Amino acid sequence: MLISKRELAEKSVVKSVEVIKVIEVQSLIGEGTEESVVRHLKEYFDLEGNLLAKHDTLND
């Protein structure tokens, strides 16, 4: 049986919340072709320059 996002959220318990410093880099990527559409990319780095996460709007 699949669990809906709402049911999962209702069953989730927040373990902790913390405010941290990160570097957010916003880029415009892609070549403007059908194979490589232009889109936004957000990347998040720690203060040592390690990539933490990225979000490519291609899948939005």
Image (cartoon, rainbow, N blue to C red):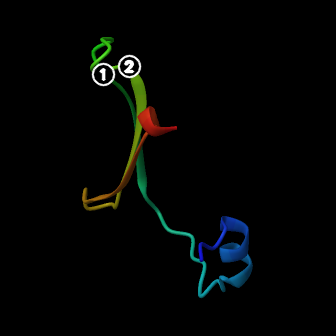
Task: Mark 1: give few (<14), some (14-19) or many (20+) Cα within 10 Å.
Answer: some
Image vertical order of residue 13 relative to residue 24, above or below: below
Q: Left or right? Give the position of 6 relative to 41.
A: right
Q: Which mark is residue 51?
A: none
Q: Which mark is residue 38?
A: 2
Q: Residue 2's x, y, as percent?
A: 59, 72
Q: Residue 53's x, y, as percent?
A: 37, 56
Q: Left or right? Give the position of 37 relative to 10.
A: left
The one of 19 and 56 positioned closer to us in this rendering: 56
SS label for mark 1: loop
At x 42%, y 25%, the residue is 39
At x 33%, y 12%, the residue is 32
Label 1 with label 2: CB-CB less than 8 Å: yes
At x 60%, y 77%, the residue is 1
Q: Amino acid at mark 2?
A: Val
Question: Residue pushed farthest top?
Answer: 33
Report which residue position mark 1 lands on: 30
